[in-house]
Structure formats: C-alpha cells, structure tokens
Amino acid sequence: MSKPFCTVNGKAYDPPANATTALEWLRDEAGCTDVARACETGHCGACVVVLDGRSVKSCSLLAGELEGRQVHSLQGMALAGRAPFAAIERAVRARQPFQCGYCKPAFLMAACDLLESQARPTEKEVREAFAGLLCRCTGYQAIVEAVLLASAPDKGRA
Amino acid sequence: MSSSPALLLPRTLEEAQAQLHRTPEARVLAGGQSLVPAWRSSGLPPAVLSLDRIESLRGVHMEGDSLQLGAQTTLHELATSALVRRQLPALARMAARMGDCFMRNRATVTGAACSTSGAGCLPAAMLACGATVHTTARTISAEQWFAPPDPTAGLQRGELVVRLAFPIPEVASHQCLRLTPARFAAVTVFATRGARGFGVGVSGLGERSLRSLSAEAWLAAGEPGDERTIAAVFDGLPPHAGADTAFDYRVAQARRLLRSAAVALARPRPTF
C-alpha cells in the first residue's frame, strides 16, 4: 500500500490533483467544506485549520506542503488532541456567540492556541490574541465572553 | 489560483542547493505568509522550493554574546522562546505582536527580514541591534542587507539564508504604530543601548528600513524632554508616499515612538 499524501481528520488522502493552495485542496479534493473560503488573501482567518498541532491559514499554504502532515479542520477538532477544545465547545454552546459562522473556525482555533499557552487569560489578553481576526456579525464581545467562560467554567459565568 | 507549480521539498541545505542548481527558476519559499497570497495576483512561479522541511534551519541558541536565530524560526517560536525572553525580551515582545496568531505559526524570521515594503518590525530590530545575516556563502551586515534595491537582490543563485545573529544589547525597546491589526506596522522604532552606544532602527519612513544616526545622537545627548532637539531627528529624509498615511504624519509618529523608546531605555530591563 502506498504511503498517503497526508491525513485530514484522521483519514488518509492522495496527493493533490489540481489544487494550488491547501484551502482549494481541502474543499475541492478532500471534501472539507467546513474550511471556509472567504477573503482567500490571508487576512480574515476563516480558512484556518490545525497543521501538526498548530493553527494556520490554509489559503496561505501550498497544497503540496501538506505532504506527510496531519491536518484537522473544525469538524475534526475532537481528534486533534487539543486539550482546551472541549471546554471551548461547552462555552460556545452555553453563550451562543456566533451568527453566520464564517469566522467560527478562526476564533475557536485561536482560542485553543491561547488557552494552551495561558489557562486563565484576562479579557485584554483574549482580545490581543484575537488581533487580526475578523467578524462582521457580532462585534466580538460575545466571542470574548465565551472564551473567558471556557477558561474559568467554575466561576459559573454561563 | 490555477495549475500548481512544481513543489520541491528538500530535507537538507545541500539538497536544497542542488535542487536550485538544477531548477534555477524555482522561487524559494519560507513561511509563505507574504508570497502565497501575493501569487494570487502576480501569478504562480513555475517552480517553488520550500525550506519547510530543513530541520537544520530551525532553532535558537547563543554563541558568545550573540543570539542566533535559525532562518526558519517562526515568529511564534521567537515570541515564546525562553532563551529570547531572557536575553532580548523586547524582541520576543515584538514578535508576539507581529501579524496574527495564525501567521506567527508559519511566518519565519527570514521571511520577515526579506520584506520589500520598507515596513516591518524585524528589520528595525535588526538595524538597531547591528544584526548580521549569515548565508551559505557569507555574512552580511543588517545595513548592507537593507540597502537598495531589496534584501534578496544581492543573493547569488543557490545562496540561502541560514541564520540571523543578534548581538545582545544591555536594554532594548520596541515601539510601533499599528493602524490595522495583523498588518505591517505603519511606523516602527526599535532602540537599543549597549556597549557600542545607542542603536535605532526605523521602518515605515522610506522605501527601506534604515538605521537612524540622528535618532542615535538624540538619545546619546540624553535630553528626552527637549522638543527643539527632536525636531531635527528624521529630518531631511526624502518624502516617501506610503500606501495609507501621509509622510509628515509618519515622521511625527516616529518622533513620538522615539520618545517612548527613550523612556523605556532609561528603565530597568523588563522581564517576562
């Protein structure tokens, strides 16, 4: 059996046929339509995936660079082994901070990155960690509150 | 984008140089955070050589009094390195604010040093610290590296950046005006005080980042509160039209940032 090109959410895939960027390959050839196609210019973060444990923008990666890597999109985050994700999921279900959902992968993965390095961030630290991520619907406040809730669920802020 | 370029993924420097020799048209790709989005509008090169798998280009260590950053060190690694936080905390704090959290996981120090926009925080830090760029062929001072036409123009075919070396100052301060999160700062001032006196690197005032002798002289004169003397700092630079802000505004902001840096340099060295 030939070695797979890479794995996505635990499933092995063949090399790219036509796609140029990782975003194109993930959506068009690997079927991961939960990876959003939004600005495609490396600004908004909607296309973010986890690459070998680190969150990256798939529109700013060439498809071929995924060779030998493990990729997780939002629907596979439970498999990615990122410890804060379960608490973030519970907080998002409790606080319901998103509207259209395009920015959801970006904020959830940025929140994972933050809580992995800082278990109890302040509100200022949460906002700084989100610098550059774009949301056109919510005004960000509810998203920040959800992350604070995820970081301190025992304080009963739900 | 349509039709993928041929992608080369060497695992050693020697393999990379051999592949560049065989495929001279290949563009070298570090973190890709500037190049891949740019290729959407400029078009794809026929071949790309990615440095992503070359482990010898990663890592941070000290050599004597100099911090050595492997060429493929990411901004996240620079921001979170215990060694960098201890030896040059201003550099770690600067890296933590560059781009956004996703970009920092891929963007490399060499990519940041290759910025051709005249903006960017790392070039200012390199100039202020008197950093050197070490390639597979030679050592280049930061001032030579950032001289026209652009940082990579002087590299020979097959010549690759291996590491950046930063002499450690006694104290350093990074100050910037970032008008849009995750984009290049509009103006950056990085100032140091050390054995060679004061060092000031500035980005955002011209086509290239520059070392400012007038700012260094102002710091050395030791009068941070004197408005008359700071009026001469950054004076005489050729007006440079930035994409989004007026030149006079950027000069005024650079002077404000320099004053903040002067105050910071006078304080005890910050720690993490």
Image (cartoon, helix red, strand yellow):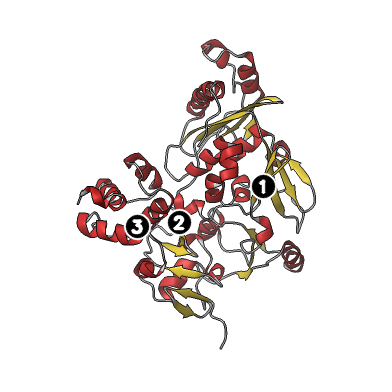
Name the residue tied to disc 1: B61
- Circle 1 or circle 2, nearest the eye: 1
Give the Cα distance between marks 3 and 1.
33 Å
Question: SS for tag 1?
Answer: strand
**Residue B48 percent across, percent down from the top left:** 63, 65
Residue B154 in sight: no
Do the residues at discs 2 and 3 belong to one chain? Answer: yes
Disc number for residue A108: 3
Q: Please, what is the three-letter code of the amino acid marked with disc 1? A: His
Question: SS for tag 3?
Answer: helix
- Residue drawn 67% across and 26% down? B194
Disc number for residue B115: none
Residue B87 in sight: yes
Q: Earlier in the sequence, mark 2 or mark 3?
A: 2
**Residue A65 percent across, percent down from the top left:** 56, 67
Q: Please, what is the three-letter code of the amino acid marked with disc 2? A: Thr
- Residue drawn 55% across and 48% down? B75
- Near mark 1 (Cα within 10 A), the count class, few <14, some 14-19 or many ≥20, is some
> Subunit of mark 1?
B
> Subunit of mark 2?
A
In depth, the one of B206 and A123 nearer the eye is A123
Do the residues at discs 1 and 2 belong to one chain? Answer: no
**Residue A58 percent across, percent down from the top left:** 46, 63
Q: Please, what is the three-letter code of the amino acid marked with disc 3? A: Leu
Name the residue tied to disc 2: A41
